[in-house]
Image: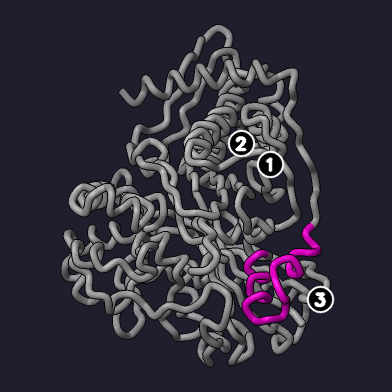
Amino acid sequence: MYLLGYDIGSSSVKASLVDAQSGLCVASDFFPKQEMEIIAVKSGWAEQNPEQWWENLKLATESVLKQSNIDASDIKAIGISYQMHGLVVVDKNQKVLRPAIIWCDSRAVPYGEKAFETLGKEYCLSHLLNSPGNFTASKLAWIKANEPEVFEKIDKIMLPGDYIAMKLTGNSCTTISGLSEGIFWDFKNETISKELMEYYGFDQSLIASIVPTFGLQGEMNAEAAATLGLKIGTPVTYRAGDQPNNALSLNVLNPGEIASTAGTSGVVYGINGHVNYDPLSRVNTFAHVNHDKANTRLGVLLCINGTGILNSWIKRNIASADTSYTDMNNLASQVKIGADGVSIIPFGNGAERILQNREISASVHGINYNIHDKRHLMRAAQEGIVFSFKYGMEIMESIGIDIHTIKAGHANMFLSPLFRNTLSGITQATIELYDTDGSVGAAKGAGIGAGIYKNAEEAFASLKKIEVIEPEIKNISAYQGAYNLWKKRLEESMK
C-alpha cells in the first residue's frame, strides 16, 4: 500500500511515493532538471504557465512509477503541496485564461495597500489577521482593473494546488487554509470575508467549494488517470501550501514549534495557539493544516523572497563555471565571520513583507578592491540571507513566538554548514535537521486524510533526525557584530 505526494514549486515539481506501512520513501524525482522559467514581463512581475506544472508532474509521476515498478492500484491516496499565494484563473470549461501570477510577483501591492486603508487596519488585522498586501485577493484585483476582458471570463479562481487538484479530479475546490493565505478568510466569523469581497467587487461564485485540508477532495478522473498511468478513482485526500505542509512534514503542529525552509525563498513558520498578529503585517498569520473552530492552530509565517535565489545568482554570475555549491561553501568558509566588512542585502526578488512591502532591491556594501574577492561575496551572501531571517524573527518574537529550536529538512540552504552555523549562532537556537521534504510530507498528509494513519504522530513516527546544530558560543559576539552592521546598512538602504 502506497501514498503519492506532489510538491508544486516555482523551481520544479517533485513526486514521492511512500510505503504507507514503513513510512519510507521508495521513489522520488523532480522535473525539470533546470529551474522552471519565471516570466517577468516587467520589473516586479513573476508569472508561470500552470500547464508547465502539469507537464512536469506527468514526468515526475512517470519516473516514480518506473523506479518503484509498483501497480498503480496499490496507490491508495494522493496529497498535494504547492507554492503559496499564487493566482490561477480558469473559465467555465476549466481552461486557464492567463499565466499564473505567482508568490513573488509584487504588482498588486498598491491594491492591497488601498484595501488596507479603506477597509481599515482594525478590520483587516482582527478579521483577516493580515493586510491584504500582495496576496491572492489583491492579485485578482489587479486583473480586474487591468485585464477586464480576462476578469469577465473567470469562472473560478484558484491557488496552484487547487489547480492541480482540479486537473487530477475535475473538481474545483479549495480549503480554509488556502483561503486564509489568499486573505479571503474572516477568522472572527469563520467564513469568506463579505467585506473584502464587496470592497474588491468580487462575486462569491468565483470561490470554489470548500473541502477539508485532510479528507476526500475528489477522485482521479479517467482523463487524468490515462495521462498519468494511475488508477481511476484514486482519492486526493490532502492539500496545503508549501510552508504549512513543510511544518506538517516536520511534525510541527502545536504552539511554540518552529519549522523553516531555505529554498528560492526562505521561511520561518511558527505555530500560535491563539489569535495574534503583527500590527504592521510584516509577518503573516494563516490557518495551519490542523486549525479548526475548536482547536486554534495558526501558522505565523516569516517569508524572505530573496534567499536561495541570491545564492544561485552568485553561483551563476560570480563563481567560475565548474564551481559547485559545495565548492562555494568551502571558499566562503575561508573568510572569517562578517566577511571582512562586506554585507549583502538580499532583497532582490520582489517586494518584501518584512519591509512593509517595499521593493528595495539587492545591494552590496563595504567592498574594498584591495582586500576583497569572490570568497567574501560568497560568505556575505549567505550571511545576508541568515541576517534577513534574524531580522524577521525579531518581529515574530515581538508577537509572542518563542524560538529555541528550529526544525528543517536536510535540503537547499540547510545543506550548507556555513548557513546552518550562522543561523544557529545569530539566533542562539538549536537546529534539528530531518530526512524529509514537501512531497513526502504531502504523501503522509494524504495518508492521514484517507484514514490510513490515525494521526500525525503515527504518520511521522518514522521521521529520521539527521543532525543537530548547537550555537557556537565562542562566535556569538562575532555573529552579532556582523548582524548589527548588516542591519545598519539595511536601515540606511530603506531611507
Q: Position of residue 441 (x, y in %)?
A: 66, 64
Q: Is residue 253 left or right of residue 67?
A: left
Residue carrying label 3: 21
Does residue 313 appear in the picture of this structure? no
Q: CA distance from mark 3 to mark 1?
A: 29 Å
Q: Is residue 370 left or right of residue 420?
A: left
Circle 1 packing at 10 Å, graded few (<14), some (14-19), many (20+), is many
Which residue type does callout 2 highlight? Ala
Q: Earlier in the sequence, mark 3 or mark 1?
A: 3
Q: The residue tagged with tag 3: helix, strand or loop?
A: loop
> In front: mark 3 or mark 1?
1
Q: Earlier in the sequence, mark 2 or mark 1?
A: 2
**Amino acid type indicated by mark 3:** Gln
* 3D distance between C-alphas at marks 2 and 1: 37 Å
Residue 284 colored magenta?
Answer: no
The front one of 44 and 394 is 394
Q: Quadrant of residue 436?
A: bottom right
Pick the quarter of the image with the C terminus: top left
Cβ–Cβ below 8 Å for labels 2 and 1?
A: no
Callout in the foreground (2, 1): 1
The mark found on residue 298 in the picture is: none
Q: Position of residue 327 (x, y in %)?
A: 70, 33
Residue neighbourhood size for the residue with mark 2, other residues' Cα within 10 Å, grouped as few (<14), some (14–19), many (≥20)? few
Note whether 387 is above or below 261 in the view shown. Answer: above
**Structural distance between the alpha carbons of marks 2 and 3:** 44 Å
Which kind of residue does numbered mark 1 sit on? Answer: Thr
- Looking at the figure, which quarter contains the N terminus? bottom right
Magenta segment range? Answer: 441-463
Relative to residue 317, is residue 273 depicted above or below? Answer: below
Please tell me the numbered disc located at residue 405: 1
Q: Are marks 3 and 1 in contact (CB under 8 Å)?
A: no
User: According to the image, label 2 marks what residue?
Assistant: 321
